[in-house]
Amino acid sequence: MRFMMIVKGTTDSEAGTPPSPELLEAMQKYNEELVKAGVLLAADGLQPTSAGIRISYPEPGGKPKVVDGPFAEAKEIIAGYTLIEVKSREEAIEWALRMPDPHGFGQGEIELRQVFEPHDLTSEPEALAGQAALRKQLDERRRP
Amino acid sequence: MNRPAARRTVDAIWRIEAPKLIAALTRMVRDVGLAEDLAQDAMVVALERWPETGIPDNPGAWLMTVAKRRAIDWIRRNRQRDDKYAELARVSELISEDDMDKALDGEVGDDLLRLVFMTCHPALSREARVALTLRLLCGLTTEEIARSFLTSEPTVAQRIVRAKKTLNAERSSFEMPSGEELAERLSAVLEVVYLMFNEGYAATSGEHWVRPLLCQEALRLGRILAELAPREPEVHGLVALMEIQASRLRTRVGDQGEPVLLLDQDRAQWDRLLIRRGLAALERCRKLGRPLGPYALQAAIAACHAEAPTSEETNWIRIAALYEALSRQAPSPIVELNRAVAVAMAFGPAYGLQIVDEIAGLSALENYHLLPSVRGELLRKLGRYGEARLEFERAAAMTRNVREQELLCARAAECDARSSD
Amino acid sequence: MRFMLLVKATGCSEAGVPHSREHRFAKEASLASMAEAGVLLAAERLQPSSGGIRMAFSPEGEPELECGPFPADSWLLAEYLVIESESMEEAIGWARRIPAPGGCERMEVELRRLEDKAHGPRNIGLENDLALQLGMLRQD
């Protein structure tokens, strides 16, 4: 299963202040660890929202509204993400806990979110659970 | 933290730390089974203590310290019982704190690589290699392995026990291979990884069930190997191949739990992330500046398909050339059949048919319905409808896939109508 | 599933008495029909047991060797076929197509299911590429 570790924006990330050399090194080491463990799929940092735009649809069926950055609420801003592929939710949590504090001055926040698998989108959760149970039963019956 | 929660957390940590622990311990005690026991003992201790004390800041280091203490105990006991000088030498090796620190710093590359070479040792059967690798390097339980292969837990457990015994009997199995042997042993490792990947998706007949766990483990192992042996082009070739193939295999799980292969018409659903990763791995392989090996060639072919935005834009001439290279390095009937299709697409059906006709009599393809399917298609394009119809009928009789059967019968009927025109 | 059809020896097969032309043709035709249907995996004939040796292993000591010919009873094989079929019933259907020899001889065939072997190493990459490419060939 895939998980996304989302690093929230901070006043520093919004100001474009580069992280300290220590933090950079810690992050690099952490990423290397993810690579060596074979779990890293992708990791990127985003530019400050001053370089971004927001597109919203305030009127249903109406024209989109485009607003230039920067945007105010740092907590609502994504500064970067790391996508990993792991076996369990616990493993994802364990990796997320090992990520260095992305800010170092009290604003660091990481959000962990599970990514939909293709079949999640097409089936009801109950149906999936039922299928899984059935499959397990059948698997067990198949055992010699 | 309550106990079940602790259990799950420790399992997760085990999965992350176990290979490193076992690899380092194996070097010290020179017994892969014992190393695993020691590592597992440490996990049991963790399971007892962590619910009270909370999880330590560096759980890997904590586990390693506990396991190391147990290893020392074991060696002392063992020495009293069986006073071999060899053991003494090992103790001195063990006592060096450096080892531990190195292991904890994550510089266990050599140990891990040595462990992979061991679990894929040629003295073991294919099944044993796969089982042992899944257990020691991927941290899967016996139950998970048994489920993945649709066999019983005792069978897998026995297989693993026997494999460990075999490795202990082969003293040389602990040595890191070098020189010419290295290449051979590495290809054995890659074979195991690819075998795992194949097993993971070898679910076509309805006899099996989708087993993506194995597929993911193979990918993960491949990615780990790419870091352990970054100068080996075929390692990157294999990773590229698996990433790109997986991009098309990322399945909608059907009603029966069977994987549905994403074909040309599903191009939009191919997993772009895995494609990007695959192309990057292939690039790493190319940069090493050696002729592409069999895995890299297969990856390059898959990459051609992945890079074509639509099927019309496929570079068939390049694909045909890559199959030609592959048929020299790793000839097989299925390579030839693929090559025939590529050549037909690049240069016309007559040339493709020539290749198919050369392999048509091979017993390896006797029951392979795609052979008459391809041959029928080529004959149809050449306007030889009578012969084409026969091939489609043969193919339809061979396949058990109902949709494929319908398609082939429709083709046969179409050819029948045209031949009587 | 795979089945082995064990064709038992007869006095005629042991004596190397040639079958009639008709029987030989019928036999060839039946094998050909199995091959065409894609069910035939192997078919071999054994030489008469006069050229064979039996070895009896006991827990201790050397195995005992005995030279043929052996009595033409139900133990003795003359031929075997390996076929792939969906069920025992289907396998019986195929076994029925083995032509009986004419004349005095009675022929016996034993059907046994083979253990499923773990399928050999496959190359899912090549198989999937082929499926993809065939799809494109069809649309071309």
Image (spheres, rainbow, N blue to C red):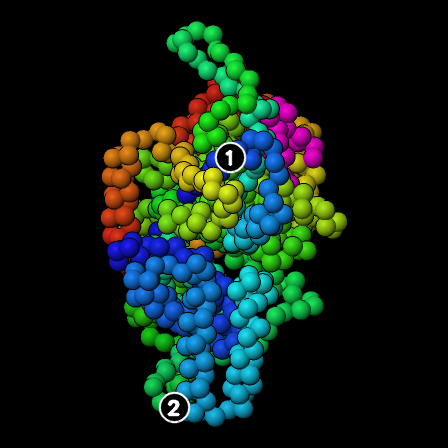
Vertical relation: A53 (above or below) A36: above
Magenta region includes residue B314: yes
Which residue is under mark 2? Answer: C61
Label 2: state its secondary structure: loop
Structural crowding at the residue carrying mark 1, measured as other residues with C-alpha within 10 Å and reported as few (<14), some (14–19) or many (≥20): many
Q: Nearer the viewer, residue B244 or B35?
A: B35
Vertical relation: B413 (above or below) B290: above
Q: Nearer the viewer, mark 2 or mark 1?
A: 1
- Residues marked 2 and 1, same chain: no
Separation of residues labelled 2 and 1 (CA atoms): 83 Å
| Label 1 chain ID | A
Residue A142 in sight: no
Residue in the picture at 33% in, 62% down: B53
Q: Amino acid at mark 1?
A: Thr
Cβ–Cβ below 8 Å for labels 2 and 1?
Answer: no
Whole-percent x and y of residue B207?
35, 46
**Image mark count:** 2
| Label 2 chain ID | C
Q: Nearer the viewer, residue A25 or A18?
A: A18
For the N terminus of chain B, the quadrant is bottom left
Q: Quadrant of residue B307?
A: top right
Q: Amino acid at mark 2?
A: Gly
Considering every residue shown, the one lying at the far right of the view is: B289
Label 1: state its secondary structure: loop
Residue in the picture at 41% in, 71% down: B66
Whole-percent x and y of residue A81?
51, 37
Which residue is under mark 1? Answer: A10
Magenta residue span: B299-318
Q: Nearer the viewer, residue B110 or B211?
A: B110
B37 displayed left or right of C130: left
Magenta region includes residue B327: no
